[in-house]
Amino acid sequence: MSGEASAPPATSPRAPRPGIQKSSGAVTKKGDRGAKEKPATVLPPVGEEEPKNPEEYQCTGILEVDFAELCTRWGYTDFPKVVTRPRPQPTFAPSASTSEKPTVDDQRLSGSCSLNSLESKYVFFRPTIQVELEPEDKSVKEIYIRGWKVEERILGIFSKCLPSLSQLQAINLWKVGLTDKTLTTFIALLPLCSSTLRKVSLEGNPLPEQSYHKLMAADSTIAHLSLRNNNIDDRGAQLLGQALSTLHSCNRTLVSLNLGFNHIGDEGAGYIADGLRLNRSLLWLSLAHNRIQDKGALKLAEVLRPFELTHTEVVERRRLLLEKGSQERSRSPSTSRHGDSKTERDKNQLMGVSSFALVEKDKTQTVKTPKGLGKKKEKSGEVVKKEEKSGPGQSPTQGTPKKEDSAKAGKGKVTIPEQKLSKGKGAKTGSKEKRSILMESELVGEGAEMVNPLLEPVEHRDGKVFMPGNKILLHLNLLRNRITEVGLEAFLTVVQYQAQFAKSKSASKGPVGLLWLSLAKNCFSPQCPTYTMIQELMLPRDPISKCKHKEEEPVASST
């Protein structure tokens, strides 16, 4: 009876303890544990019921669902939630429309210090993935991650779920503890994302090796890049300047670059200026809140007006001109000779339709569609004229690149060796890709993107070669640096030159230089005459001030 009386405690809630196991309704004692424990260990533990493989999961395109499922499959029990990004206006601009939110906060603060009230107070600081949604189909448009460390495994999860977001346009990572290694992983996942992704912001992520330039590689599709608060110094600025352009390579997709709140000095500003010499895609540049003094300001101002080419640049220019001339000669006169011999041979058979025309069709089939026979004869004459122009040397060809840019883009001619490898069939398809990439850069002519800046028209003075300067850059912010009146004089010269150039070229299309220049809060008086002159010259160029002036005119006339 004592053995039977001891049975009920084994069936109590304490039964799952290791001492006693229950199996198929039978009760076992501690002495029988060794015989009955094996079947119990075969049972899978709770939470590990089935092996979960992240590779087998097919993303649905809903970030909240995909991220949660992939985190679970990767073994995360506590992970950030995907939430809609709150609008910043109510939090930063107290007004009548935001009166509801303070009342809720007041109620929380006035309530008892319970666990629920503490959780509600600090819910803002919990790690989240904030998203902005398209108003029409509620698809994810932008992603914001702020203030929590993004590890390698999280980036691996992103590489699975981000490619399914077809409308993703921007990724913003603020103080997420990036390292040089995780930055490389992040850059590797960018090509997997939708082609609509054009904006990347990595702010507050200082890196020991300052490898931010990898985001501006030749194959990068990023159009807007923000690198504020990353402790970038002159060494990092050197890498960024080289990524903008060198003698043999150039970034052709980046439209805006924000380098504010860093540690860039005169030397770093010089490297950025070197990158602007041959870059013809960057429209917007901010170097605000850095350590740039007059020496760096002079370097930046130098590339915005006619500047002298270095010896290596002159040599490269001559090489490009020779290569261009040889390409034209190989395309036109040689085929005309073969065409002449074949026309004489087949004259009686073809009755005026020469095989030269057929060869020319094959050569220029990208755009030159069949024309009249009389025009074909004229075309052969134009080809000879082109050879005469390109033959003698540099000076006769100075005016030809600009005049023939549109024709070259249509013919599929490629002047830069690097483009020859990347464009493939012709430059026309490349120009369409550029147009889709640089939606904001409509002011940049298609020909300017196609032709190497070294082939732009130049000016010869005193045995030196001068380029017209970078007129693609429209916005330059040098707020709160250490520039004095010496640097101001250099920028005044730039603004005067570009204003005069804009007047002389007003009828022609193309970029005319800076439309917005900020030099405030530097080491000079706001009442400085030079600074006042710069403001007066820039005011009619600023498109925002033009719009305001146009809006004020009807109001004044109506009153």
Image (cartoon, grey):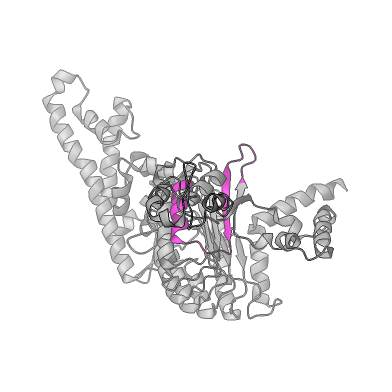
Name the spot of residue 109 as percent of width and height, x first: 81, 64
Q: Using the image as rendered, state which of residue 43 and residue 33 is in the foreground.
A: 33
Q: Is residue 449 visible?
A: no
- Asked where in the image residue 381 lies, by quadrant, the reply is top left
Q: Is residue 144 magenta?
A: yes
Res 247 seen here: yes
What segment is highlighted magenta in the picture?
133-161
As drawn, 539 above or below 487: above
- Which residue in the rendered view is the most extreme toward the right? 559
Rendered image quadrant of residue 129: bottom right
Q: Nearer the viewer, residue 472 or 375?
A: 472
Question: Residue 412: x, y in percent?
Answer: 33, 41
Q: How many marks?
A: 0
**Residue 294 falls within the magenta-colored stretch:** no
Q: Find residue 261 and report its horizontal and vertical position in percent.
A: 57, 71
How far from the left and from the top, in percent, is residue 232?
Answer: 49, 73
Which sits in the foreground, 234 or 67?
67
Q: Residue at x 25, y 56 (%)?
A: 322
Q: Nearer the viewer, residue 104 or 252?
A: 104
| Furthest residue in direction left, as rendered | 345
Image position of 419 (left or right of 488): left
Q: Relative to residue 461, is residue 89 drawn left or right?
A: right
Determine whether, in the image, residue 35 is placed left or right of residue 85.
left
